[in-house]
Amino acid sequence: MSTNVKTRVVLIGVLTLLSLFSLFGLPKFPPTSRQDLRENFENRIKLGLDLRGGTHMVLQVQVEEAVHLECDRTVDRLTDLLRDPAHNIPFDEVRKLDSTHILIRNVPADQAGTLRSLINENVPGWDLGPAPGEANSYTLTMRATVAAQIRRDTMRQSIETIRRRVDALGLTEPTIAEHGRGENEILIQLPGEGDPTRAKAVIQAGGQLELRLVRGGPFRTQAEALAQMGGVLPVGTELVRGRAERASPGEAPLSDVWWLLDRTPVVTGRDLRTATVGPSTRSPGRYAVNFTLSRDGAARFGPFTEANVGQRLAVVLEGRVYNAPVINSRIDDQGLIEEFSQPEAQDLALVLRAGALPASIRYLEERVVGPSLGADSIRQGLFVSIIGLILVMILMLLYYKQAGINASVGLVMNLVLLLAALASFGAVLTLPGIAGIILTIGMAVDSNVLVFERIREELGLGKAPASAVDTGFSRAFLTIVDTHVTTIVSCLFLFLFGTGPIRGFAITLTIGLLINLITAIYVSRTIFLWQLSRAGRQATLSI
């Protein structure tokens, strides 16, 4: 056997051992049982939602809430600017008309130019115009491009926030992407690894932390609150439901209460930098979430708390007041949310660390894919793959006789290398991915047929077996590469523009085609060379 053939055999042997290691791990002594090998294999091949089971959800992001919030912030910013002694522009009212329009009432005519300059310099993205039917009043209109950008940013931030939360839970290869046709929908698929119930709870908790000044409460009912306000809420306030306060010993537990809060928060979840869990300072055995604000949030929070010492500050999560502690002193960059069990505190800290959703979400669709469907799909897919592989090997042996062994060895090695590559790269195997594996087997057979037929033609021309093998592989090589590259380019487009299952098909087919170039050209040719080197000058090919 020549040195070239020996080198080829060693390389193929090393590649095979590495593949087996990727699939089953290191062998154990005493020898590993079949059950251990099976568990190792199952742990290394990651299954998708359609095979393993899990949760499928379609969410809709309420992007208009982000536009409304930007309008509220603009109202507050504009009010402060007009009252600033540096400008001191008289006005009667600054009021939001809807999500994209703000009314500025009764500005003196001689201040119109100053007002316009102030808005152009400090409130970009808004156009100032006269208010219809009102003298000396103006309407501030958000530009359509700005509103559209806010909606796009809201969708992008929502997807990234949900992805960070799911990743923090350790779920394997989730699918999180835009869904539908411009309806602000997000598709979420969580394969069975991890805890889908907890993942759903974390996703549902929008993490919209808001710190708002308390203007009144707590009230036992909305009617009680309205009665104390004379039936009309003060401008810029709203009633928000809160958790029941702790009852005194001997008293019956209280039901949910209501708080009168400022409509615009001073700090939101966007201003959060970190969130950690620690023991509660008020209740032994309970836990609290400590959060730290960003520099910009702290710059607003410090002066606000200093000006409102002695007042209550409501901690609002997902539109519900969790607690309303009294502001005892100036607070710059740190805060505390108390009264949680340990799992609740950990999940809340995870949600806040992952980032705040810029708008609330609504669930349009939710279903659980049971593992029984996945097991059935796996059994059928493996059965079809094995039957197809066996039938192809039998046909190759019948048609090409002894040379068919080369093709059979190449097919088996192709499958082993493909599964090893999936395990090494952490790729997720889906039902369309199994279809890609089956198609790879077909492409591998096609490559062997091209090579064998070229060798048969060369033998028919009277060439020696060694020369026929060299010429056959050389002339078939370009054709095989051409067909494989064409298919890989198609897979690239499927991966770029397809959804999760389509991408799984594209990934397995691409990996299979790249491996097929190794098995059909390198491995198969090595077997031919090994056979010819053993036979010597009397070498023949049964092909």
Image: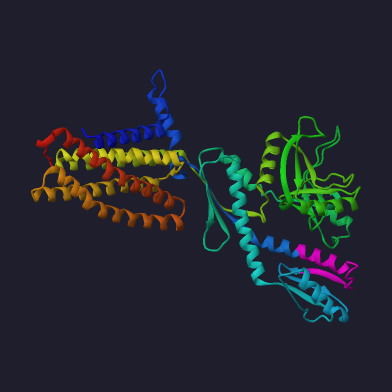
Residue at 77% x, 75% y is 139
> In the figure, 531 relative to 94: above or below?
above
Q: Is residue 84 located in the magenta-colored stretch of the structure? A: yes
**Hey, which quadrant is residue 73 in on the image?**
bottom right
Residue extending farthest front: 3
Q: Position of residue 501 (x, y in %)?
A: 43, 50
Q: Is residue 61 located in the magenta-colored stretch of the structure? A: no
**Hey, which quadrant is residue 283 in on the image?**
top right
Residue at 79% x, 30% y is 284
In front of the other: 22 or 219: 22
Q: In which quarter of the image is the N terminus?
A: top left
In front of the other: 269 or 359: 269
Give the colour scheme of this rendering.
Answer: rainbow
Q: Where is residue 31 in the image (x, y as percent from the top left)?
A: 38, 20
* Residue 389 visible in rendering: yes
- In the visual, does 436 lie left or right of 52? left
Q: Where is residue 504 in the image (x, y as percent from the top left)?
A: 42, 49
> In the figure, 504 relative to 280: above or below?
below
- In the visual, does 171 lie left or right of 463? right
* Residue 543 visible in rendering: no
Q: How many numbered circles are shown?
A: 0
Residue at 40% x, 46% y is 431
Q: Position of residue 176 (x, y in %)?
A: 54, 51
> In the figure, 471 relative to 238: above or below?
above
Residue extending farthest top: 30
Residue at 24% x, 41% y is 524
- In the visual, does 295 lie left or right of 437? right
Range of magenta residues: 72-96
- In the visual, does 129 lie left or right of 493? right
Q: Quadrant of the C terminus?
A: top left
